Amino acid sequence: MAKAMIVGAKGQLGQELQRLLTELNWSFDALDVTDLDITDKSAVRVKVAELKPEVILDAAAYTAVDKAEDEGKDLNWHVNVDGTQILADVAAEAQVKLVYISTDYVFDGTNAGLYLEDDPANPKNEYGRAKWAGEEAVRHSGADYYIVRTSWVFGEFGHNFVFTMQNLAKTHDKLTVVNDQTGRPTWTRTLAEFMMHLLTVNAPFGTYQLSNDNSCTWYEFAKEILKDIDVEVSPVSSEQFPQKAYRPRHSVMSLDKAKSTGFKIPTWQEALNEFLNSLVKK
């Protein structure tokens, strides 16, 4: 098995990757920001030379979407663009493969149909702009790369919508959730498995999109999360929940290219059910 270097190892996806690679008996080094500052090119060069990975799994990102509009704007760009540029450049120099995670926020959400990998990007918030610039840095670096766009991520590690809904249901009899934003939820397990699948089958390098199959609104997602809990969930419009950062209203991405690699994608309902059952067993 190839040796991997995970950056962003303590994040939601990074921890999922560690668990999966352990199960798969892959050799890997897991690095968080305390182990490696990805915005320091010399440090990245030294670490790659030291660890000699065959692939870098880039799960490092600044993901505070609303803060990225103002107080976190510089940090958002520094991590998501400058850091990505450095990882990609060093990967190219060292002839190491790179897997970079991007987002549906590179699209503006005005497309009524499915977004394809080569559809024009038009990010409308600072986080989306930075992730798109990160994609472009990877594409032009000369590295062998996989860019994987995803959306609405949930999993066992870290803060996410599933835990937010469950926690709110403990203290509220009624919840209101926006019903005019449509996308695809993504279980970190499915995303991590797809990343490793690309490497295992030597899929063609390039840009892919991966979420769980089927789509829903946040309201529909919440209803499914809380279906076995005694709480009333009501739909509302985005105007009733104003946020600093623009959210795409319809950011459903095509999964056909991912499926063409032979990867079997569970529906978000199946993934959510398996995830919730796994929590009960712990």
Image (spheres, grey):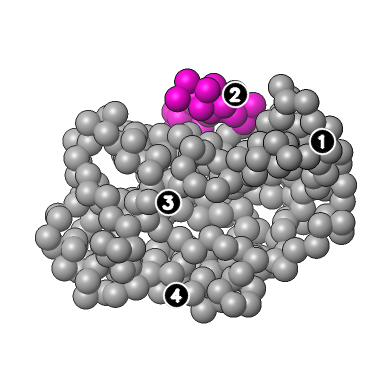
> Front-most of 120 and 247?
247
Which amino acid type is marked by label 1? Asp
Residue located at (49% from left, 74% from top) = 75
Q: Is residue 56 visible to us here?
A: no
What residue is shown at x 31% (from left), y 69% (from top)? 37
Magenta stretch, main secondary structure class:
helix
Q: Looking at the picture, how far across and down is residue 54, in whole percent?
A: 21, 50
Q: Earlier in the sequence, mark 4 or mark 1?
A: 4
Q: Do residues under tags 1 and 3 come within 8 Å of each other at their CB atoms?
A: no
> Label 4 vs label 1: CA separation?
42 Å
* Mark 3 vs 2: CB contact within 8 A: no
* Residue at image mark 4: 78
Rendering coords of residue 194 (x, y %)? 43, 37
Q: Position of residue 134 (x, y in %)?
A: 46, 66
Q: Is residue 269 left or right of residue 266?
A: right
Mark 4 and mark 2 lie on one chain; the one further toward the N terminus is 4
Q: Earlier in the sequence, mark 1 or mark 2?
A: 1
Task: Look at label 4 and name its amino acid.
Answer: His
**Dividing the image into 4 quarters, which one contains the N terminus?**
top left
Instruction: Quadrant for the C terminus, please.
Output: top left
Q: Residue at x 61, y 53 (%)?
A: 104
Dot 4 falls on a residue whose secondary structure is helix
> How far is mark 1 from mark 2, CA to CA?
23 Å
In the image, residue 49 above or below residue 181: below
Q: Residues within 10 Å of mark 4 (few under 14, many from 20)?
A: some
CA gap, disc 4 and disc 3: 18 Å
Give the residue at the far left of this rendering: 50
Q: Give the residue pinned by disc 2.
A: 273
Residue count near mark 2 (Cα–Cα under 10 Å), binned few <14, some 14–19, many ≥20? few
Q: CA distance from mark 3 to mark 2?
A: 22 Å
